Amino acid sequence: MNVLKVSRWTIAAFVLPCLLLYVGLVFAPILVSFYNATLNWNGIGVAKHVGLDNFQRMFTHDSVFWPSVRRTFMLAGFSMLVQLPIALFVAILISRYVRKPNFLVSSYFMPVILSVAVIGQLWKTIYNPASQGGMINQILIKLGLGDWTHAWLSEPKVAIYAIIVIGLWQYLGYHILIQFTGIQNIPADIYEAAKIDGAEGLTADRYITLPMIVPIFKISVVLSFIGSLQSFDLIMVTTAGGPAHATDVLASHMYNISILSQKYGYGSAIACFLVVVCLVATVIINFLFNRLDRRYN
Amino acid sequence: MNPSASIAVREPTVSARRRGFSLKKTIVFGFFGILLVTQLYPLLWLLIYSLKTNEEILSGSFFAMPASVQWTNYSNALAGGRYWHYLLNSVIVTSATMVCVILLASLAAFAITRFRWKYGQLVMLIFLMGMMIPLQSTLLPLMLIFKNIHILNTRWAMILPYIAFQIPIAVFIMSGFLRTIPHEIEESAIMDGANVFRIFRSIILPVSVPPIMTVCILTFINVWNEYILAATFISKEALKTLPFGVYSFVSQYSVNYGAIGAFLVLGALPVILVYFLLAEKITKGMVAGAVKG
Amino acid sequence: MITTGKKVAGTAMAGFLAVSLAACGSSKDNNNGSDAAASPSASASTSASASASASAPASSDSGSKEKVTITFQNIYPDPTDPKYNMLRKIVKQYETDHPNVHIELDSLNTDQQKQKLKTQAASNEVPDITIVNPSAQMKPYVDAGLFAPLNEMVEQNGLKDTFQSGILDYYTFDGNLYALPDGNNIALMYYNKALFKQAGIDAPPTTFEDLVADVKKLKDKGIQPMTIGEKDTWTGSFLFMNMLLRTNGGPGFLQDIVDGKKTFEDPAFKGAVDSFETLVQAGAFQEGATSFDYNAGENLFKTGKAAMYFMGSWATGGIEVSDANKDGNVGVFKFPTIGGKGDPNEFMLAPGSAFAVSKNSKHLPETLDFLNYFMLNYPKEAFAAKGAVGVAQKVDGDFKAAGYSDMAMEVLAMFKDVKGGDISFDNTMNPATSQAHLSSIQNLFVAKKDAAAVAKEHQQAYEDNKE
């Protein structure tokens, strides 16, 4: 239960500047977007009101839409179910075994700092077809697994998975950092007390680390989910959503529609969908974690 | 009122007892090593890349070294790329954003997590919703707003939206950490007669150094490399930031990859520096003082 | 508690105000300080009114003319590109001749400039001078009344006559000219003579059937026949349209569609699709072509790894100085006929990006005057900088003497043979239809599809997106 009882002025002083700036510059444009979604507009000239037509079209007539939704969720799913547990695992290992964790944690964070342009170029040399000297394919051939070579970024069935791998790799350090900081926040005496009771190592982790890291883990889950949904740069740099929409996700589809096809109204409808999905997911995640929190505390 | 005891950071449990060879340890460190290589190789790769010619880059296989070191890439980046000028602007914009974000977000997070207040959760939800908003969809409305309050083509047209977009994540992270601080801290402080602001300044802030540093780093990275928003609202050469320099080497039918590589290396250096500096502070901050109940 | 709260709120507000004033001041100083080349000027673009009034008294110019800043948005950001220096040379000269004018250059890469212009257009903030692509791509802006007509300006100083005949039509709507192009290019096949010889090919193909046969010969020798940067979907479309130009027996297919005389299910279109697929299935293009962007694709040719490269003549500059062209190893030939149809002297035309002037420019007369000056000097400077192949204006001068390469001379000779042609799909059709087309063609690189199905796809997209 929150303890501090304060006057409304104090609350305002603490919250308002932040809230107002944010609502004005982030929220208001989204509301404008919601309005734009009801228009047939190329962004430059005159707009025409079409009510919910854009939404109807999006759900029923757009052959790119649902596959891109599927891919977006796939990206999010892999992030949450593969990347995060690995990050947590690594964070626990580091806190357990490494005396000067700084260097390691900082180094793992490197890919996050690099711009997507660099990462895209790098992974292209990794994924290039065998005839262009791509690293993976060359290794496969040397191992005698020539049949398994692919043009990783050009084959429609494989490309999205190739991109997912890049995403998982890039942000691993990001989540390791967050989880690690969370683990470090757990007071050491709890572990001492547990040791006295005979529990240490993995057992200690199960009963102490995991429950106590729940709020921090939640941060990672939400960030990773939202990050996946907004994932755009990486797709654009590697495949631009191609070939023929095989790697399009919601954000890139929205970009193509709004900017390239100049259907700004329709693109806004997609943006609305994105926002709503994020909202629903965040509420669900919040709810689940609160349940988890209450169980352990 | 002062923290009565400081907690030690969780010390590695594999202590001096286990000297010498240990299979578990070798495996673990081997794993760390492999991970290290995969995470750090890109930097090395970028360095090599920045010293190649365009042809070498584009035909690049994974391990190829340049035939001859192209230092001209760096001279192109520094001179034509106007590195120092853009660097200064980036520093100004990024630090202003960082300071404001930390201030505003910690105030708000503190209020949401510690005040007894009806609307706390609602406000939190409003902030959360903002995290999902893709930048591109706000460009047009923001342009209209900025045009009407006459800040187009000024530093504010960059700083204000950067702050606004970083706030949700910052509030989120700060609240997450603040929630883990036991309430007893405040109780004892209130009994000693301190008011809210005192509590915030003298107790909560020092304890929050780790999340603050995390927010610092995240903000820094997001703002330092940001290009689309800046390019849309800024047209004056005098205000342009580092990413402009990177993209300036992209022409209509050709791209000077070598110069871009050099520019990226030069642009990444400050980030890496700042990151390592702050990372020090994170671990130091943790040792210096969380409060025990 | 209450009073403290109010006090703090008040202090916070005051603090915020102080910070904003300070920042206002610092940006003011930066306006005047870091922009060393320019004297303090009343800027044409919006800025806080405080700084505007403060800088006026600071101006030291004793002239009676009002200080003018013109924003020149352009797509030559690369300092290592000769066009960059050309631009700045002309600008500097103009500023010296007209000391009251300052040209503020906003140089961006192509994609970002397109996006930015769109955003600026939507909020009526179009810069004084900007860049647009011809015909269908600039039409939305013209329809929204954003550009100033250039009819009068182009008559001054005989500017109109410097342009090649007919080129200005691509920038004219309803009798009004709205933009002046920086280039005019045609599509050619570049080829690597040594690789041809290796595969036993004596002369460049003149028919499509020969082309496919040559592709097979090259492949048999382990040589990459052609290269393309299909991550940038316009490259595949460009090639396809050239085939359509042949199978249609002449230009104007898309225009016939727009006029309702034909549909995409016309045999000419299907014939082009079939030919395109034949080429792809024969293995002409490199593996993974759809993840090669324009530069990567061109690079394969420039490093001598591919034998043929279909591209616009703007690529000449880069190819001239590449490894592949050592000892004049690269030649050009015209796109062949298909099934005996089409005239090789009809080319894919690529009128260049063009400079347009904002109708709401705060300094319209000065801007028009500057642009006139700029375009007059453009061909001269381009010639001197060896970039005159592909300029939209007539260039006088002895190219050979000026040091232009043999390959450049060959390309220039091709220009003389031009009897007509088509412009690209995305310069003819509206953006949404174009996107569908680009995607459809890109798909042909990864999957074989029935020509009738492709035609239907196009027709459907065209009808869905008709305005």
Image: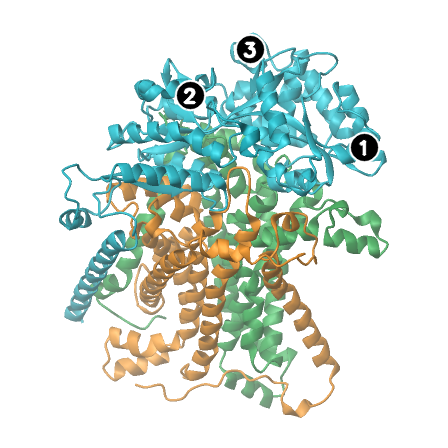
Instruction: State the CA–CA distance, disc 1 to disc 3.
Output: 42 Å
Q: Which chain is orange?
A: B
Whichever of callouts 3 and 2 sits on the residue coming sooner in the sequence is 2
Q: Are marks 1 and 3 on the same chain?
A: yes
* Residue C145 in sight from this viewpoint: yes
Residue type at tag 3? Asp
The front one of B172 and B165 is B165
Q: Using the image, name the chain to which the residue with label 2 belongs.
A: C
Residue type at tag 1? Lys
Q: Which residue is mark 1?
A: C197
Image mark count: 3
Q: Which chain is green?
A: A
Q: Using the image, name the chain to which the residue with label 3 belongs.
A: C
Picture quarter with the C terminus of chain C: top left
Q: Which residue is mark 2?
A: C162
Q: Which chain is cyan?
A: C
Residue type at tag 2? Thr
Secondary element under disc 3, as helix, strand or loop, is: helix
